[in-house]
Image (cartoon, grey):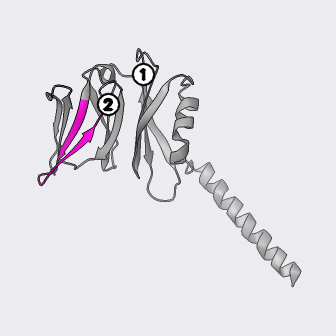
């Protein structure tokens, strides 16, 4: 009786190991959402004294990394693949002059979300989302860079500066 139980247990363990090995070999094991900052720091060689800040949804994550004097930046976009995969996978990143000067929208084909990333030189203080029924307002620290993930069909996206002026505007059909 004990031998049969031991054989079954060893068989189940072997199948689990083979399954995890199969997922790993097919690059289907990503980074857990709680480990994204560590992955960003490691993979993009972000220094410990840099700030890493961002936004994570169920299917996309966007981050911006920068030193305290905000003289440089690195951004990172990750996606959580559907199907038989686990975790988030790096999709793109680096530095981009438009991120430094303005707000850049990043989309990934096949995903229903998008990321807005900026070093916030325009001093954006508010994001407004008009879905046709109501306007949702999200506060943004005007003294800090930002990375925000929003649904692709959220509606009209407006970024406003500290004076209430429109800085950027996206009219996405619902």
Pick whichever of labels 1 and 2 is earlier in the sequence: 1
- Give the x, y percent position of residue 23: 60, 54
Q: Magenta stretch?
A: 125-140
Up-down: is 15 above or below 7?
Answer: above
> 100 left or right of 42?
left
Residue at disc 2, secondary structure: loop
Up-down: is 67 above or below 112?
Answer: above
- Give the x, y percent position of residue 31: 55, 45
Taking depth in this image into account, of 134 and 23 the one nearest to the observer is 134
Q: Main secondary structure of the magenta part?
A: strand
Q: Residue at x 81, y 79 (%)?
A: 5
Disc ID at residue 73: 1
- Give the x, y percent position of residue 125: 25, 31
> 91 left or right of 155?
right
Residue 41, quarter of the rendered image = top right
- Inspect the magenta stretch and tell me whether residue 111 lies in it: no
Disc ID at residue 141: 2
Q: Residue at x 41, y 37 (%)?
A: 54
Q: Residue at x 49, y 43 (%)?
A: 89
Residue at disc 1, secondary structure: loop
- Give the x, y percent position of residue 156: 16, 43
Disc 1 to disc 2, C-alpha distance? 17 Å
Question: Do the numbered discs 1 and 2 sit on residues whose CB atoms are within 8 Å?
Answer: no
């Amino acid at each position: 009786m004990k031998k049969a139980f031991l054989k079954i247990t060893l068989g189940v363990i072997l199948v689990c190991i083979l399954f995890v090995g199969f997922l790993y070999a097919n690059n289907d094991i990503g980074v857990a959402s709680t480990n994204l900052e560590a992955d960003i720091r490691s993979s993009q060689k972000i220094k410990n004294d840099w700030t890493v800040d961002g936004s994570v949804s169920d299917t996309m994550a966007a981050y911006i990394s920068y030193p305290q004097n905000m003289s440089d930046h690195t951004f990172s976009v990750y996606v959580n693949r559907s199907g038989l995969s686990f975790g988030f996978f790096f999709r793109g990143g680096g530095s981009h002059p438009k991120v430094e000067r303005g707000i850049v929208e990043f989309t990934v084909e096949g995903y229903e979300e998008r990321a807005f990333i900026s070093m916030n030189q325009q001093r954006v203080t508010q994001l407004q989302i008009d879905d046709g029924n109501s306007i949702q307002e999200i506060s943004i620290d005007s003294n800090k860079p930002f990375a925000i993930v929003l649904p692709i069909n959220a509606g009209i996206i407006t970024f406003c500066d500290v004076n209430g002026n429109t800085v950027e505007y996206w009219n996405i059909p619902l």
